Image (cartoon, grey):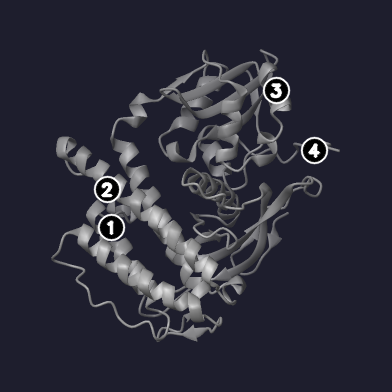
Amino acid sequence: MPRNLGPDLTEDVRDGPPPPLDGFAMLPVWVEAGYDGGRFAGWVPSVPGVLAVADSHARAVSLAVMTTARVRGWLEAHGDEAGIPRMWRGELAGDVRASTRDDGYEVNATLPTDRRVVGDEEVAAAVRRLAWARTDLLDVARRIAAHEATAGPLPTDTTRGERRPDEVLRHVAGSEVWLLGRLPAVGRFDGPMDGVPVVDVLAGSRAWVIDRLDSLGRRDDGTETTDRHGETWTLAKVLRRIQAHGIDHLWELERRLVRHDGTRDRIDITLDRLPETGRVVGLLRSVGWDLRASEPASLERALRGTTEFATAWDGDRLVGTARSISDGAQNALIATVVVDPAYQGLGVGERMIHLLTDGRDLVRFSLAATPGLEPWYRKLGFLPDPHALFRPRRRA
């Protein structure tokens, strides 16, 4: 039965695995209900930069695990060890709620972990990561400009809240200034936001933010203040949100570009191309399936025992997997359905499932869905089974 977590909040409770193995850790996720107009935001305060916005509480938790893995990979690509332990699974740390005022202003929650002192090292790490995010943002902006020069403006779906790419860039700059300006004694940014090239807006606002952060990091005492809207703020909260906001919009623009730059058509999905186990390990790690990624010998045996193995490729890059273990006539199990986070939303997972199941109407396919993804599988014809049971893996 669902466990009641407060008004409008429920979580699927299942018989879970035993406590984490040595070297693995639960990932504590705070869920903020009412975020972004009524959705659920998954925050991982121990990993600045993680923001997972979903339509359900359960999905916010599971998506936060994947987003943490993606942030980890992004940091490692920039030479940052990140210090993120191997993840067992997401664990609900607690629930908070955003509220909306009568004037439409959304008052976001201050997490318990936001109420603390921030030191110089944490500020320096945030500045370093903000710089990487800005470099990557400018790079994707250049790629969008090159695409638009030949294909026309990047489509903008306003029904999904999308802005034009240049508007996203100005929004990132303005939000950094606005977030830091919630703190007392910071002052106001007096640089131009309109009427100048967007690269100048980004440069001017970033210089102002870095200058203020350097000063704040030397004298933060954890003081919590309240703004005129009734929202409370600390330096820790500002750092959490400013890093997550920058990375979230970076990946938004990347996601929108790959929807229209030919990537979808370039992806090859096949049953005839088996990847090396090491490539599958990397794909599992990219979505936070750290336990499975830590057992390459077991994984290789599982791959050898697979009846059909659907894989998705962008050139030589493995971007998706889905396996079928079948008796060939009546029953089959779908497993290891994984899509690289950078390629999600392109229909890769759906195409792999269809490749494994189409034309096999007399076979009963079963699977274990990641919490929150049940609606996606239902669209592909899968139904919940209240009578299904399983015996967990037994590890020493």
Q: Amino acid at mark 3?
A: Ala
Q: Which residue is mark 3?
A: 302
Say which quarter of the image contains residue 121: bottom right
Q: Secondary structure at mark 4?
A: loop
* First reached walking from the N terminus: tag 3 or tag 2: 2
**CB of mark 1 within 8 Å of CB of mark 2?**
yes
Left or right of 38, for residue 293: right
Q: Amino acid at mark 1?
A: Leu
Q: Residues within 10 Å of mark 1 (few under 14, many from 20)?
A: many
Observer able to see residue 143 = yes
Q: Nearer the viewer, mark 3 or mark 2?
A: 2
Q: Which residue is mark 4?
A: 392
The label shown at residue 211 is none
Q: Gap in Å between the C-alphas at discs 4 and 1?
A: 47 Å
Q: Residues within 10 Å of mark 2 (few under 14, many from 20)?
A: many
Q: Nearer the viewer, mark 3 or mark 1?
A: 1
Left or right of 199, for residue 287: right
Residue at figure coordinates x 60%, y 35% from the top left: 284
Q: Which residue is mark 1?
A: 169
* First reached walking from the N terminus: tag 3 or tag 1: 1
Left or right of 93, for residue 125: left
Q: Amino acid at mark 2?
A: Ala
* First reached walking from the N terminus: tag 4 or tag 3: 3
The label shown at residue 141 is 2
Closest to the observer, 253 or 264: 253
375 relative to 124, above or below: above
Q: Secondary structure at mark 1?
A: helix
Q: Nearer the viewer, mark 4 or mark 3?
A: 3
